[in-house]
Amino acid sequence: MSSPAPWPQRQRSDGRVMLVAGRMPGGATRLTDLAESGPLRLRLPQMAGGALEGVFLNSAGGIACGDRFAIAADLAPGADLVLTTTAAEKIYRSDGPVTEIAADLRVAEGARLAWLPQETILYDGARLRRRLTAELAPGATLTLFEALVFGRAARGETVSEGLLHDVWRLSRAGRLVYADTLRLDGPIADQMARPAIAGGARALATLIHVAADAEARLEEMRALIETAGCEGLGIEAGASAWNGLLAVRLLARGIGPLRQAATRILEGFRGVPLPRVWQT
């Protein structure tokens, strides 16, 4: 007789989107290939000029224990694409299995990709393993923004237990230029309360900009952080630049102030409004 499984065996969601974007002869960016499976879909709102905008939709309404989601985006030379999500993504409580989310981004010479999903909300007991990798050509531009929220503020929820393993790896011309790993396991609230980790913050965000002029824009970014009112909103924020990239960290007591400041910073830095779904 076989040993019992350590947790209930359930049918889980497996959502995948693979897309390729290219620049057309007239200069516009269009999808040249798209594959979708499971509950994950990509929608393309009609836009007047500017970059092509893609919005990911999870028809399952959230991500439960053991679900797997994967996105692969490949930008051909000269393509200009913005990717976001319809709403905040919810990671539900798990009774054992780990949810896995992976994003694999490839940006060719002269292409521009803005990865701007709305925040991810971790419920108490959530178990998430997430990995983002990006391969850039020397003349590519990549702007990444990700925000994490620990617990549902409206319910007064604290993420007392759970798992978060978040890995970012960015390479340019085949050479690793940025590596970041965050791992919180077990008593997450206690870990987040430590001054060396988050000092009691319940929302955090990272913005990475990789471009030829990234380092030259450091003082501009620091000025945007100041004018965004981060100090008045109770947000700890800092920016640094090295190795052809610009990095920003934000820590806040809640997602409301963080989202407000991030909107101001992103719109000021990119010079265009955020996708419309951010405003609904």
Image (cartoon, rainbow, N blue to C red):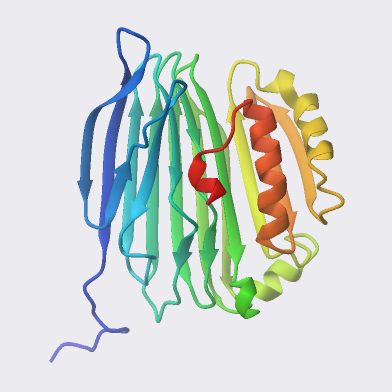
Q: Position of residue 57 (x, y in %)?
A: 35, 52
* Residue at screen point 23% across, 89% down: 4
Q: Position of residue 157 (x, y in %)?
A: 62, 78
Residue 20 vertical position relative to residue 200 in the rendered view, above or below? above
Front residue (pair 263, 247): 263
Q: Is residue 207 left or right of residue 81?
A: right
Which residue is situated farthest in the bottom direction here?
Answer: 1
Q: Is there any visible trace of residue 187 in the rendered image?
A: no
Q: Quadrant of residue 28?
A: top left
Which residue is situated farthest in the left direction here?
Answer: 1
Q: Is there any visible trace of residue 97 in the rendered image?
A: yes
* Residue at screen point 55% across, 32% down: 143
Image label count: 0
* Residue at screen point 36% across, 32% down: 46
Q: Position of residue 114 (x, y in %)?
A: 50, 32
Residue 260 vertical position relative to residue 45 in the rendered view, above or below? below
Q: Is residue 240 left or right of residue 110?
A: right
Front residue (pair 276, 193): 276
Which residue is situated farthest in the right direction here?
Answer: 232
Residue 72 vertical position relative to residue 15 in the rendered view, above or below? above
Residue 9 vertical position relative to residue 204 in the rendered view, above or below? below
Which residue is situated farthest in the top direction here?
Answer: 25
For the N terminus, the quadrant is bottom left
Q: Position of residue 279 (x, y in %)?
A: 56, 47
Front residue (pair 132, 18): 18
* Residue at screen point 52% across, 50% down: 118
